[in-house]
Amino acid sequence: MNSKQQHPPKYLQGILWSCDVNKLDIEQNKTYIIHQLLAYGNISQWRWLFDTYPADRIQNVFLTKPYKDYRAPRFNLIANYLLDVGNYNPNPARYVKNIPRDIRPRT
């Protein structure tokens, strides 16, 4: 992680709309920041994401803290290409917003 930054830059405010970026801490709010940028960001915003967090941390957050706010095409792009986590078989019902919630216990 880039140790000089404590907060996301102002130009990410449009993607991180639920909080003032000046109040977001890059480490404490990493789950929200990572998922918002993956779900709604563009290539330049993804570049900032990968410059800020190591790829393995981004993958870990994606896999261990599902965020049900992705559209199906974006989920597939992120899981199968950008993060290449398809071999972990992330359950789309835990990520894609128009799929009914999966309430079964994780196995």
Image (cartoon, rainbow, N blue to C red):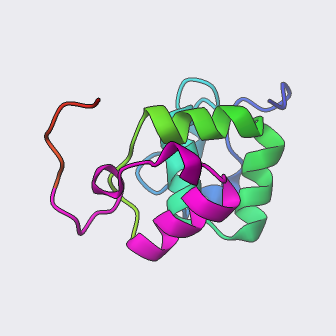
Give coordinates of residue 44: x percent, y percent. 78, 66
Q: Is residue 39 left or right of residue 96?
A: right
- Give the residue at x 79% y 32%: 5
Q: Quadrant of the N terminus?
A: top right
Front in this rendered view, residue 37 or 4: 37
Asked whether 83 falls inside the magenta stretch, the response is yes
Q: Position of residue 25 (x, y in %)?
A: 60, 29
Residue pictured at 63% horizontal, 25% vertical: 27
Q: Quadrant of the C terminus?
A: top left
| Residue 56 highlighted magenta (yes or no) | no
Note whether 74 is above or below 93 in the view shown: below
Does residue 36 lie above or below 40 as drawn? above
Would residue 25 be visible to someone looking at this image?
yes
Residue 11 can be seen in this image: no
Residue found 51% across the figure and 54% down from its top: 36
Q: Total number of numbered labels?
A: 0
Foreground residue among 20 and 31: 31
Residue 64 percent location from the top left of the image? 46, 32
Residue ranking furthest to the bottom: 73
Q: Using the image as rendered, state which of residue 61 and residue 15 is in the foreground.
A: 61
Q: Is residue 69 above or below residue 89?
A: below
Q: From the viewer's perspective, is residue 41 above or below residue 84?
A: below
Tell whether 5 sits left or right of 26: right
**Residue at horizontal 13 percent and vertical 41 percent from the top:** 103
From the top left corner, tell me how far across and down residue 80 is, in percent: 60, 61
Based on the displayed image, in which of its 4 quarters is residue 93 positioned?
A: bottom left
Q: Nearer the viewer, residue 72 or 38?
A: 72
Query: Which residues are drawn in magenta?
Result: 72-100
